[in-house]
Image (spheres, rainbow, N blue to C red):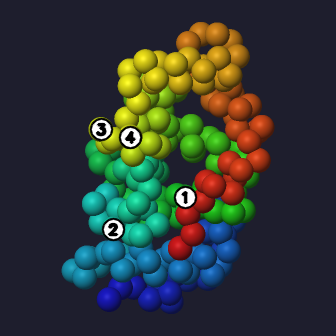
Amino acid sequence: MGATASQLDKGMLSEYQELTYLTKQEILLAHKRFSELVPKEEIDRINCRIPMNLVLTLPELKSNPFNERICKVFSTSDSHDGSLNFDDFLDLLSAFSDSATLEIKSHYAFRIFDFDDDGTLGRHDLEKLVNCLTGGTDDTNLTPEEMRQLIDNILEESDIDKDGTVNLSEFQHVISRSPDFVSSFKIVL
Protein backbone atom coordinates (compact mmCIF):
# COMPACT_ATOMS: atom_id res chain seq x y z
CA MET A 1 0.00 0.00 0.00
CA GLY A 2 2.82 2.41 0.73
CA ALA A 3 6.37 2.73 1.79
CA THR A 4 7.51 0.79 4.80
CA ALA A 5 9.10 2.25 7.88
CA SER A 6 12.42 0.78 6.76
CA GLN A 7 12.61 3.40 4.00
CA LEU A 8 13.46 5.93 6.67
CA ASP A 9 17.08 5.17 7.44
CA LYS A 10 18.43 5.75 10.93
CA GLY A 11 20.22 8.93 9.88
CA MET A 12 17.05 10.47 8.47
CA LEU A 13 15.07 9.36 11.50
CA SER A 14 17.61 10.95 13.84
CA GLU A 15 17.61 14.15 11.81
CA TYR A 16 13.81 14.32 11.89
CA GLN A 17 13.88 13.81 15.67
CA GLU A 18 16.39 16.68 16.02
CA LEU A 19 14.35 19.04 13.83
CA THR A 20 10.87 18.33 15.21
CA TYR A 21 9.05 17.84 18.49
CA LEU A 22 8.17 14.29 17.46
CA THR A 23 9.37 11.00 18.91
CA LYS A 24 10.84 8.21 16.80
CA GLN A 25 7.55 6.32 17.00
CA GLU A 26 5.54 9.39 15.96
CA ILE A 27 7.83 9.97 12.97
CA LEU A 28 7.50 6.35 11.87
CA LEU A 29 3.72 6.52 12.21
CA ALA A 30 3.67 9.82 10.29
CA HIS A 31 5.74 8.20 7.55
CA LYS A 32 3.31 5.29 7.37
CA ARG A 33 0.28 7.63 7.20
CA PHE A 34 1.96 9.85 4.58
CA SER A 35 2.96 6.83 2.51
CA GLU A 36 -0.63 5.60 2.49
CA LEU A 37 -1.58 8.81 0.66
CA VAL A 38 1.18 8.53 -1.96
CA PRO A 39 -0.04 7.28 -5.35
CA LYS A 40 1.21 3.74 -6.02
CA GLU A 41 3.07 4.77 -9.17
CA GLU A 42 5.17 7.35 -7.31
CA ILE A 43 8.77 6.17 -6.97
CA ASP A 44 10.22 8.88 -4.69
CA ARG A 45 7.81 8.47 -1.79
CA ILE A 46 9.61 10.87 0.56
CA ASN A 47 10.02 13.86 -1.76
CA CYS A 48 6.74 13.61 -3.64
CA ARG A 49 3.95 16.09 -2.94
CA ILE A 50 0.52 14.98 -1.80
CA PRO A 51 -2.28 17.20 -3.15
CA MET A 52 -4.22 19.07 -0.48
CA ASN A 53 -7.47 17.24 -1.33
CA LEU A 54 -5.80 13.93 -0.40
CA VAL A 55 -4.22 15.33 2.78
CA LEU A 56 -7.66 16.55 3.83
CA THR A 57 -8.96 12.98 3.77
CA LEU A 58 -7.03 12.30 6.98
CA PRO A 59 -9.62 12.10 9.77
CA GLU A 60 -7.47 14.39 11.94
CA LEU A 61 -7.85 17.20 9.40
CA LYS A 62 -11.13 16.36 7.73
CA SER A 63 -13.33 17.93 10.41
CA ASN A 64 -11.01 20.81 11.35
CA PRO A 65 -12.62 24.10 10.25
CA PHE A 66 -9.15 25.44 9.36
CA ASN A 67 -8.01 22.37 7.41
CA GLU A 68 -7.28 24.16 4.12
CA ARG A 69 -5.47 27.01 5.88
CA ILE A 70 -3.40 24.48 7.81
CA CYS A 71 -2.27 22.82 4.57
CA LYS A 72 -1.51 26.15 2.92
CA VAL A 73 0.49 27.44 5.89
CA PHE A 74 2.65 24.29 6.08
CA SER A 75 3.02 23.77 2.33
CA THR A 76 6.37 24.73 0.82
CA SER A 77 4.98 24.36 -2.69
CA ASP A 78 5.94 27.19 -5.02
CA SER A 79 2.38 27.19 -6.37
CA HIS A 80 0.87 27.76 -2.88
CA ASP A 81 -1.61 24.96 -3.58
CA GLY A 82 -1.54 23.42 -0.12
CA SER A 83 0.18 20.24 -1.27
CA LEU A 84 2.56 18.70 1.25
CA ASN A 85 5.78 16.74 0.96
CA PHE A 86 6.93 14.57 3.87
CA ASP A 87 8.98 17.37 5.46
CA ASP A 88 5.93 19.68 5.33
CA PHE A 89 3.79 16.93 6.84
CA LEU A 90 6.25 16.44 9.71
CA ASP A 91 6.43 20.19 10.32
CA LEU A 92 2.63 20.28 10.57
CA LEU A 93 2.50 17.36 12.99
CA SER A 94 5.40 18.76 15.01
CA ALA A 95 3.73 22.15 15.48
CA PHE A 96 0.52 20.47 16.61
CA SER A 97 2.24 17.93 18.87
CA ASP A 98 1.91 17.95 22.65
CA SER A 99 5.67 18.62 22.90
CA ALA A 100 5.68 21.81 20.81
CA THR A 101 6.20 25.01 22.78
CA LEU A 102 3.57 27.68 23.30
CA GLU A 103 5.66 30.00 21.11
CA ILE A 104 5.63 27.52 18.20
CA LYS A 105 1.92 26.76 18.57
CA SER A 106 0.94 30.42 18.79
CA HIS A 107 3.16 31.33 15.81
CA TYR A 108 1.47 28.77 13.57
CA ALA A 109 -2.01 29.52 14.93
CA PHE A 110 -1.42 33.17 14.06
CA ARG A 111 -0.34 32.26 10.53
CA ILE A 112 -3.39 30.00 10.10
CA PHE A 113 -5.74 32.77 11.27
CA ASP A 114 -4.02 35.39 9.06
CA PHE A 115 -6.19 34.52 6.06
CA ASP A 116 -4.83 37.30 3.83
CA ASP A 117 -1.20 36.57 4.79
CA ASP A 118 -0.43 40.22 5.55
CA GLY A 119 1.21 39.59 8.93
CA THR A 120 -1.66 40.96 11.01
CA LEU A 121 -5.13 39.88 12.05
CA GLY A 122 -7.40 42.60 10.76
CA ARG A 123 -11.19 42.82 10.83
CA HIS A 124 -11.56 40.63 7.74
CA ASP A 125 -9.30 37.92 9.22
CA LEU A 126 -11.20 38.04 12.51
CA GLU A 127 -14.54 37.77 10.72
CA LYS A 128 -13.35 34.71 8.78
CA LEU A 129 -11.97 33.24 12.02
CA VAL A 130 -15.31 33.68 13.80
CA ASN A 131 -17.20 32.21 10.84
CA CYS A 132 -14.91 29.16 10.81
CA LEU A 133 -15.39 28.66 14.54
CA THR A 134 -19.17 29.02 14.40
CA GLY A 135 -19.63 26.78 11.39
CA GLY A 136 -20.15 29.52 8.83
CA THR A 137 -23.72 28.56 7.95
CA ASP A 138 -26.82 30.75 7.77
CA ASP A 139 -28.02 29.14 11.00
CA THR A 140 -24.83 29.91 12.90
CA ASN A 141 -23.64 33.17 11.31
CA LEU A 142 -23.77 36.23 13.50
CA THR A 143 -25.72 39.25 12.36
CA PRO A 144 -23.55 42.07 10.99
CA GLU A 145 -24.10 44.00 14.24
CA GLU A 146 -23.17 40.98 16.39
CA MET A 147 -20.05 40.39 14.27
CA ARG A 148 -19.01 44.05 14.51
CA GLN A 149 -19.48 44.02 18.28
CA LEU A 150 -17.54 40.77 18.70
CA ILE A 151 -14.64 42.01 16.56
CA ASP A 152 -14.65 45.32 18.46
CA ASN A 153 -14.41 43.33 21.71
CA ILE A 154 -11.58 41.15 20.36
CA LEU A 155 -9.64 44.22 19.25
CA GLU A 156 -10.32 45.99 22.56
CA GLU A 157 -8.78 43.04 24.43
CA SER A 158 -5.95 42.22 22.00
CA ASP A 159 -4.89 45.32 20.07
CA ILE A 160 -2.38 46.74 22.54
CA ASP A 161 -0.98 49.39 20.19
CA LYS A 162 -4.51 50.39 19.04
CA ASP A 163 -3.68 50.23 15.32
CA GLY A 164 -6.87 48.31 14.46
CA THR A 165 -5.13 44.96 13.98
CA VAL A 166 -3.59 42.20 16.09
CA ASN A 167 0.07 41.51 15.35
CA LEU A 168 1.96 38.36 16.32
CA SER A 169 3.29 39.67 19.64
CA GLU A 170 -0.18 40.90 20.65
CA PHE A 171 -1.64 37.53 19.68
CA GLN A 172 1.04 35.69 21.67
CA HIS A 173 0.34 37.92 24.67
CA VAL A 174 -3.36 37.00 24.56
CA ILE A 175 -2.56 33.30 24.07
CA SER A 176 -0.15 33.32 27.01
CA ARG A 177 -3.11 34.12 29.25
CA SER A 178 -5.13 31.19 27.89
CA PRO A 179 -4.10 27.96 29.63
CA ASP A 180 -6.34 25.82 27.40
CA PHE A 181 -4.71 26.98 24.15
CA VAL A 182 -1.79 24.53 24.19
CA SER A 183 -3.98 21.50 24.91
CA SER A 184 -6.54 22.45 22.26
CA PHE A 185 -3.99 23.17 19.49
CA LYS A 186 -3.00 19.62 18.58
CA ILE A 187 -3.39 16.91 16.00
CA VAL A 188 -2.62 13.35 17.04
CA LEU A 189 -2.15 10.57 14.50
**Rendered position, 120 above or below 189:** above
Q: Is residue 177 left or right of residue 90?
A: right
Secondary element at image label 4? loop
Q: Of the residues tagged 3 and 2, which is closer to the observer?
A: 3
- Between the residue at mark 4 and the residue at mark 2, the CA separation in whole angstroms equals 25 Å
Secondary element at image label 1? helix
- Between the residue at mark 3 and the residue at mark 4, the CA separation in whole angstroms equals 6 Å
Q: Earlier in the sequence, mark 1 or mark 2?
A: 2
Residue receiving disc 2: 57
Tags 1 and 2 touching, CB below 8 Å? no
Is residue 47 visible in the rendered image? The answer is no
Q: Amino acid at mark 4?
A: Thr
**Classed neighbour count for the residue bearing mark 4: other residues with Cα under 10 Å, few (<14), some (14–19), many (≥20):** few
Q: Which mark is residue 91?
A: 1
Q: Earlier in the sequence, mark 1 or mark 3?
A: 1
Q: Of the residues tagged 4 and 2, which is closer to the observer?
A: 4
Q: Of the residues tagged 1 and 3, which is closer to the observer?
A: 3
- Image x and y of residue 30, in percent: 51, 75
Tags 3 and 4 touching, CB below 8 Å? yes
Residue receiving disc 3: 138
Q: Nearer the viewer, residue 158 or 23?
A: 158
Tags 4 and 1 touching, CB below 8 Å? no
Secondary element at image label 2? loop
Q: Amino acid at mark 1?
A: Asp
Q: Of the residues tagged 1 and 2, which is closer to the observer?
A: 2
Residue receiving disc 4: 140
Q: Amino acid at mark 2?
A: Thr
Q: Is residue 27 left or right of residue 141?
A: right
